[in-house]
Image (cartoon, rainbow, N blue to C red):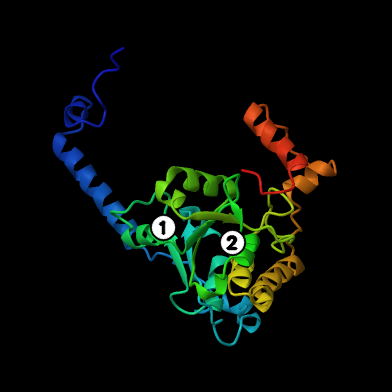
Amino acid sequence: MDNGPCVCSPVTLEENGLPACDASYADDELVDAFGDLAALPVEVEERRPTCLRCRRPQKVCLCPFLPQQPLEVSTCLYVVQHPAEESRVLRTVPLLSACLPQGKCNVIVGRRFNEEKHPELAAVCRDDRTLILYPGPKSQSLEELAQRLEISAVKHNVIIIDGTWSQAKNMFLKNSMFHLPKQVQLNRNLSSQYVIRTQPSNICLSTLECAAVALSVLEQNDEIQEILLRPLKALCSFQLQHGAQVHHSKEHLLRNGMYDKPMPKNKRKIKRMEKLMTDHSVCPR
């Protein structure tokens, strides 16, 4: 349906009794108006000063809970981080980095990795000394592996995927280089201290907690785990004191009839929920 000529065109303005020169004048007035708006001062939101070591706002700095000197470790960590983790406020990787010497906690952000764009990571994945921490049927127990081998005599690399469980699964499956290292998982009986974020099951750990356990096993020093968990406990304690709620795992909520979300209709998701109730050996994937 034809609605006629556009009322903003010079022809239409002339037809309506307004000369084209007046239309040009109106355009100039519009440009001037926008120019005036552009000249208005822009209010820039001031960001809170951030501590350079723990990466927390200075008012809630966690440096008193960090070791005075970085922990001396021979193991080198490679944290492969999903991009979404960078924007999270309550991240654990900055605390982990703050506890270790420079070069011992390398954070690489991305979803897809290949040898052309990430030659250093590709070389690490091909290294016989490299382990990737990811649970599954092909995983060996890191604790048992340490008992069988002279683990302390070798300087290991450990790759840890940092993201939600679904993000970690996607990154592991879609990056073939992550299938090259020996796959290990943690069998140490430890409940997560990261109670301000929901975990799938009671035995699923945060990135910092995984690193703390892995380093204590590989370095054969249980004190490392205690030192690394100290700032995480302080972070959670502070958040709980200021209004945060304890987040029980999805497994806990299901077992105690506290899960208040609609149950999934997808069969695969239903099986995953059932696995939370029955499988206590590994974190669900």
Residue 218, image x, y percentages: 58, 70
Q: Is residue 115 left or right of residue 277?
A: left
Residue linked to disc 1: 125
Element type where label 1 sits in the image = helix
Q: Is residue 196 left or right of residue 58?
A: right
Residue toward you, 151 or 222: 151
**How many numbered discs?**
2
What residue sits right under mark 2 in the picture?
Answer: 207
Q: Quadrant of the N terminus?
A: top left
In front of the other: 87 or 161: 161
Q: Residue furthest right?
A: 256
**What amino acid does circle 1 point to?**
Cys
Q: Is residue 52 above or below residue 179?
A: below
Per the model, the C-alpha gap separating discs 2 and 1 is: 19 Å
Residue 242 % position (x, y): 73, 67
Q: What residue do we see at 15% from left, 35% from top? A: 20
